Image: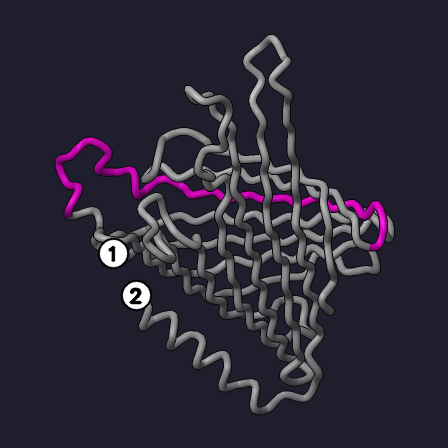
Amino acid sequence: MWKTAIVCLVVLTSAAFATTGEWEKTADLGLLFSQASYSDEWAGDELGTMTWTFTADMEAVRDLSEATNWKNTLKLKYGQTHLERETDSGKAWASPQKSTDRIFMESLMRFGVDKPITPYAAFTTESQFHDGDNNILSPALLTESAGVGRELIVNEQTELFTRVGLASRQRMAYGMKTVNDAGLDWVTDLSHTFNENFKAVSKLRVFQALTSSASADLAGLPGEDNWKGVDVAWETTFSAAVSKYIQTTLFFELLYDEEIVKKTRYREVFGFGVTYKLF
């Protein structure tokens, strides 16, 4: 559970006392906005809409030694949609509804980065600010993994790094029993800069469970073997700068997890708005 996450963070943080390099930090904040309104003279049933989405993409990288690198990533997304509705007294704005909600944090420690094959240890947290019942940080998925990785491409335009290892996970949700599983984990990260104003970042994660605490609880029930399915999560973000503070962003995510639903889920978020580079 959370104790495992705390132990991982303490172990990784303790290594920072022997650092030899400076932090390389990036933080891009954005507020995407869209709006539509109609006067009462329209003959149809047109209703106004207003949508806003806050995004934050932050990264901090530091060389702890000549052969050890520590990379921390935090991605936040939260947005709401406001809709007009017809009432007896005319049009009125309904209460806002959540349109997107995501928290993703990853801490990756790589050892022997001067070698072709690099051992690693990683800790990942996935959650959201709140669920439909306003329970904070629910549901949550914690992943601890270790294995080996390799940089396939590294140049001024492209970075491609893939890693494979063993992983343990904890699925948690408010009012539900925590599910623990363990298995094989494969993660590939791609970053490509087309030019100074156009960039793409993609991440593919594949997990194959070999054991799960849910197997005993589900024995004899429909879907008792769903935990054995391969979990896939693939996300890609295209960002294009129109000017220094104006940017368009296209985010696409594809998910497949039989424990949730036996169908592929996807979401796409396109936005145009104000961005600010914190550092």
**The label number, if any, that marks residue 1 in the structure image:** 2
Q: Looking at the image, what colour scheme do you see?
A: one colour
In depth, the one of 242 and 218 nearer the eye is 242
Q: Is residue 243 left or right of residue 214?
A: right
x 63%, y 83%: residue: 64
Q: Which quarter of the figure is the N terminus placed in?
A: bottom left
In depth, the one of 252 and 94 nearer the eye is 94
Q: Which residue is mark 1?
A: 178
Tell me the element at label 2: loop
**The label number, if any, that marks residue 88 in the structure image:** none
Whether label 1 touches label 2, CB < 8 Å: yes
Q: Is residue 45 above or below residue 95?
A: above
Q: Position of residue 168 (x, y in %)?
A: 36, 60
Kindly report the distance in space between the C-alpha atoms of the residues bearing marks 1 and 2: 8 Å
x 32%, y 40%: residue: 259
Q: Which quarter of the figure is the C terminus placed in?
A: bottom right
x 58%, y 44%: residue: 235
Q: Is residue 134 left or right of residue 119?
A: left
Give the magenta-colored segment's residue range.
217-244
Instruction: Tell whether position 60 is magenta.
Output: no
